[in-house]
Image (cartoon, rainbow, N blue to C red):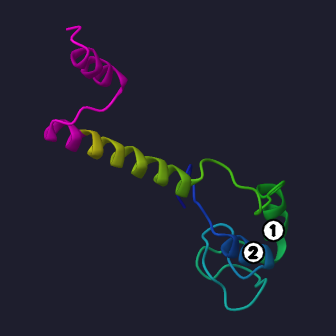
Amino acid sequence: MMHGLNVAASVEDVEQVRQGYRCIRCWEPLDNAWPKQCPLCGFPIATHQAEHFARVYKGYDPSLRTGEDWEAAADRLEERQERRRFARRARESGIFLGSKRIGDALSRMKGQS
């Protein structure tokens, strides 16, 4: 037992706990549903697991996503890195990007600077 431990469980794992095929205390997979007690930690599964599950997972909805969409965040980071690489290559090659440099070039072409 590790107090204060936060565990990210898959929908399948939570469903196994709900159906009595996994101990809610130690997450040990069980051979049969709802044994009298967990063979690993001794938790009284038959008498206490359903009540404990109802209390712990009250309001649990596996279809809801919480937190950040990791795929979208990874895409944003990848795009930002690609933009930085592009800008660095442009600087190293002597190509100027951006309206200020274009404005300077147009002014030089018109003989204003």
Q: Residue at x 25, y 22 (%)?
A: 105
Q: Is residue 82 above or below residue 40?
A: above
Residue in the foreground of this view, choosing between 10 and 16: 10
Viewer can see residue 5: no
Instruction: Judge left or right: residue 20 versus residue 86.
Output: right
Residue farthest front in this picture: 110
Residue in the foreground of this view, choosing between 71 and 19: 71
Q: Which residues are magenta?
A: 88-113
Mark 2–mark 1 Cα distance, whole angstroms, equals 16 Å
Where on the picture, by quarter, is residue 35?
bottom right
The x, y position of residue 1, in whole percent, is 55, 61
Amino acid of disc 2: Glu
Q: Is residue 83 above or below residue 19?
A: above
Q: Residue at x 84, y 54 (%)?
A: 59
Residue in the foreground of this view, choosing between 35 and 108: 108
The x, y position of residue 61, in whole percent, is 80, 59
Residue underneath mark 2: 15
The x, y position of residue 87, in whole percent, is 28, 39
Instruction: Judge left or right: residue 99 versus residue 112.
Output: right
Amino acid of disc 1: His
Residue underneath mark 1: 48
Where on the picture, by quarter, is residue 40?
bottom right
Q: Residues within 10 Å of mark 1 (few under 14, many from 20)?
A: few
First-in-chain label (2 vs 1): 2
Find numbered disc 2 in the image and state the secondary structure of the residue it sits on.
helix
Where on the picture, by quarter, is residue 64?
bottom right
Q: Where, quadrant-wise, is the C terminus in this rendering?
A: top left
Viewer can see residue 41: yes
- What secondary structure prevails in the magenta region? helix
Q: Is 109 part of what is drawn in magenta?
A: yes
Q: Is residue 42 above or below residue 60?
A: below
